[in-house]
């Protein structure tokens, strides 16, 4: 991070063993009075998350909401996502394509939840965590899902969350890379028993439709943001 230094009160909080609710209030008031709005704010947030070994219950919500708002509301294209955003997220929130912590996974899922446009590459990245869990048994999703060689109801709920806005009046509209990610998951299944909904999902991915009972409503709420592409291309800022 070259010459970057944490300012007060973040510099003091970073040296503590436990980050408290009072610390979050100080951060909101002094470090991030307008939320996470700059590259330095992101570096500060990530540094605090990595340096404080213990955190109060409110930290996860603060981290998820703050980083999501930065990605979706402050970064160009403001209020949405593009491929540069997605590549930046992957560089910050994963290692060699693996999302390693539940908090990082929660950020990815929340970004998918709130963005009115989700690039296929982001959905494919999130779907691939299931394949990694099945094939390699590593990553945050592997640690959270029930141990099984096949697709479980838990896995389907996770996939439904990712694909929620891809459902349109009973049809599942996927790009090639999203469809390929689902079939890569299927190729990683080593057991013979999977939830019946998995075969339905694969059929929908192939044919473009699902039974109406499984169709999901689409949230088209609009958002839009303000940070240049250059920041997303400069991964050293958040290394």
Image (tube, rainbow, N blue to C red):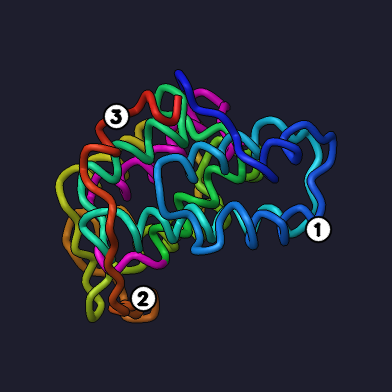
Quarter of the image where one finds residue 88: top left
Quadrant assignment, res 8: top right
Q: Counting residues from the N terminus, which is met first, the one under dot 1 or under dot 2?
A: 1
Residue 230 in the image, given as x and y percentages of width and height: 22, 37
Does any portion of residue 200 appear in the rendered image?
no
Q: Earlier in the sequence, mark 2 or mark 3?
A: 2
Query: Residue 110: x, y in percent?
Result: 47, 59
The residue at which mark 2 appears reads as: 216
Which stretch is magenta?
A: 114-142
Rendering coords of residue 72 (x, y %): 35, 60
Q: Is residue 68 among what the camera can see?
A: yes
Q: Earlier in the sequence, mark 3 or mark 1?
A: 1
Q: Is residue 177 above or below residue 132?
A: below
- Residue 139 magenta-drawn? yes
Q: Is residue 182 left or right of residue 2?
A: left
Name the residue carrying label 3.
Answer: 234
Task: Determine whether the residue tagged by mark 1 lies in a helix, strand or loop.
Answer: helix
Which disc number belongs to residue 22?
1
Q: Residue at x 38, y 45 (%)?
A: 127
Disc 3 from disc 1: Cα separation: 33 Å
Q: Which mark is nearer the camera, 1 or 2?
A: 1
**Whole-number angstrom distance, CA of label 1 to CA of label 2:** 40 Å
Q: Residue at x 30, y 54 (%)?
A: 75
Compared across the picture, whether 63 is left or right of 199 comes to right
Q: Secondary structure at mark 3?
A: loop
Q: In percent of the image, x 50 and y 51: which residue is there?
A: 107
């Amino acid at each position: 991070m070259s010459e970057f230094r944490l300012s007060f009160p973040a510099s003091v909080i970073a040296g503590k063993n436990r980050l408290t609710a009072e610390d979050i209030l100080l951060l909101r008031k002094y470090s991030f009075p307008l939320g996470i709005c700059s590259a330095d704010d992101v570096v500060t947030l990530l540094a605090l998350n990595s340096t404080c070994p213990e955190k109060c219950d409110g930290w996860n919500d603060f981290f998820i909401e703050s980083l999501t708002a930065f990605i979706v509301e402050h970064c160009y294209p403001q209020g949405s996502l593009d491929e540069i955003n997605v590549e930046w997220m992957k560089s910050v929130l994963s290692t060699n394509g693996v999302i390693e912590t539940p908090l990082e996974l929660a950020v990815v899922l929340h970004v998918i939840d709130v963005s009115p446009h989700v690039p296929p590459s982001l959905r494919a990245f999130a779907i691939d965590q299931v394949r990694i869990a099945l094939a390699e048994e590593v990553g945050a999703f592997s640690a959270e899902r029930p141990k099984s060689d096949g697709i479980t109801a838990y896995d389907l709920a996770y996939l439904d969350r990712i694909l929620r806005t891809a459902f349109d009046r009973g049809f599942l509209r996927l790009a090639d890379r999203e469809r390929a990610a689902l079939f890569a998951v299927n190729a990683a299944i080593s057991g013979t028993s999977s939830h019946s909904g998995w075969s339905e999902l694969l059929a929908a991915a192939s044919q473009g439709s699902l039974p109406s009972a499984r169709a999901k409503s689409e949230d088209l709420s609009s958002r839009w943001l303000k940070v240049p592409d250059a920041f997303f291309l400069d991964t050293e800022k958040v290394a």
